[in-house]
Image (cartoon, rainbow, N blue to C red):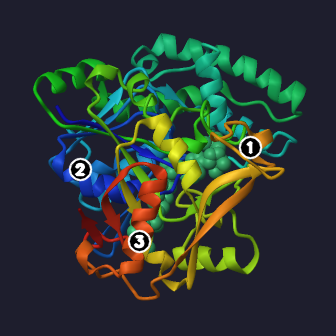
Amino acid sequence: MNITVLVGSQWGDEGKGKIVDILSERYNIVVRYQGGANAGHTVLIGEKQFILHLIPSGILRENVQCVIGNGVVIDPKALLDEIKFLEENGISSEGRLFISQNAHLIMPYHKLLDSINESSATKIGTTGRGIGPCYIDKYARKGIKIVDLLDRRVLEEKIKINIEEKNNILKKVYNQKELDVNEIIKEYIEFDKLIDKYITDVPTFLNKAIDNEKAILLEGAQGTMLDVDFGTYPFVTSSNPTAGGACTGTGIPPTKISSVFGIVKAYTTRVGLGPFPTELTGEEGDKLRKVGNEFGATTGRPRRCGWFDAFLVNYSRMINGIERAAITKLDVLSYLDEIKVCIGYEINGKRLKSYPNNVNLLERVTPIYETLPGWKVDISNIKYYDDLPSETKDYLSFISQQAGFEISIISVGARRDQTIEL
Ligand code: GDP
Ligand code: IMO
Ligand code: MG
């Protein structure tokens, strides 16, 4: 049985897209289990860059089937744009893409409410894709699901009830223009016509595939520290990117998951607001951002950059049960004379015994660093571990020992061939 969950171990953008693309050659099915078009997973094939937001990155391998699970929130426009973009590049989703009937739909008012909240005192620097408000409706049991598209009458009624409520809020609380119900109903009916063929009973589909010994890769979006339960709440996303989310977001039972694979960037980045103990501000941070080309794949925002935080990644290992990991963007560190790695935190001179899963504490910590020598040579064309400089090997073994997992893939560039397997 090979059912692997792939998780981002930091604050997202670890290079999940590239590694899913590499691994998916060995899997029959790739599944997204949470998040939505807030994700931006980049895959570089030759000169062509693909940025996937909703469709699993496995779509770029023609023998792979792709599934969007019930845990995902689907923006119709983003999905159709993506299917079209793939088609324009010779990749057909038909017969290969399966969308859960229980996934929730992002509605125009979700995006509007997301942007209104972002201009308030409780803003967190979201991607503006309507993610939070859509999950709010899901848990308030007001959401509109893919399955509702299949019955016009149900769809119209649900949209009407929701818009009536949202219009009240928009008008009375936020002093905004009301939304046009009929226009939105029309738009979603159109959407149904286009995606009808992809709608699937996903738990049955996946469990049958498991019975038939198919290999399944579950592609997490975002990262552990953005998890609504285990991340830096409230500066998180509204879903569970951690490994547990792979079961609730698909209908695959926990007893069928065979391993959890971590994607770990060789340094740390974060987009949006919230604590970031090892952040480099000023020139040092600017340089790392420039060399690493750290600008958001979804919003284009500059990413905040900092040193590798082994204390954080060790926490991530614990929460997800990561046994093996891919270290990505190692090539980016080649310009540094010395590289710092955070091995713990202290508050008022007292070292913390476990990771503070609480922003009030996290905002007050001082990182404890170990300094390692840099390697100062270009490693981006190295194909074998043995050919890496000794300083690079020392850096890898230090972070793997501190974080508590084995490294099985090293990525030294964005292209497929810039990958070292151990
Ligand atoms: P994801 O959200 O985890 O899939 O990551 P993103 O795609 O948002 O960001 C990762 C960025 O780094 C993309 O631009 C990738 O093309 C690029 N990338 C991935 N792996 C490597 C690597 O090993 N080295 C370098 N230099 N770039 C990489
Ligand atoms: P991938 O899958 C990095 C961040 C946003 C914001 C917070 C909440 O490409 O790694 P949301 O729009 O989800 O309500 O925003 O989460 N965020 C991400 N940061 N990578 C992502 O996805 C992200 N998706 C959301 O910047 O801080
Ligand atoms: Mg990304």
The residue tagged 2 is: 24
In the rendered view, does 321 fall on the left or right side of 171?
A: left
- Give how far across and how far down residue 408 sits, in percent: 29, 57
Which is more N-terminal, label 3 or label 2?
2
- Give how far across and how far down residue 384 sits, in percent: 23, 74
Does the Cβ of the disc 3 residue fall within 8 Å of ligand 1?
Answer: no
Are the residues tagged 3 and 1 within 8 Å (C-beta)? no
Q: Above or below — where is 274 with respect to 359?
A: below
Front position in the image: 63 or 163: 63
Disc 3 marks a residue whose amino acid type is Asp
Q: Nearer the viewer, mark 2 or mark 3?
A: 3
Which is more N-terminal, label 1 or label 3?
1
Rendered-image quadrant of the C terminus: bottom left
Front position in the image: 344 or 223: 344
Q: Above or below — where is 211 with respect to 53?
A: above
Q: Is residue 39 visible?
A: no
Disc 2 marks a residue whose amino acid type is Ser
Does the Cβ of the disc 2 residue fall within 8 Å of ligand 1?
Answer: no
The quadrant in which residue 367 appears is bottom right
Q: Secondary structure at mark 2?
A: helix
The residue tagged 3 is: 394
Q: Residue at x 56, y 32 (%)?
A: 239
- Residue at the bottom extreme, as displayed: 377
- Residue at the front extreme, as displayed: 350
- Give how far across and how far down residue 305 sits, in percent: 63, 66
**For the residues marked 3 and 1, what is the alpha-carbon distance in whole angstroms?**
45 Å
**For the residues marked 2 and 3, what is the alpha-carbon distance in whole angstroms?**
29 Å
Q: Secondary structure at mark 1?
A: helix
Which is more N-terminal, label 1 or label 2?
2
Q: Residue at x 52, y 60 (%)?
A: 297
Query: Mark 3 Cα within 10 Å, few/some/many (few <14, many 20+)?
Result: some
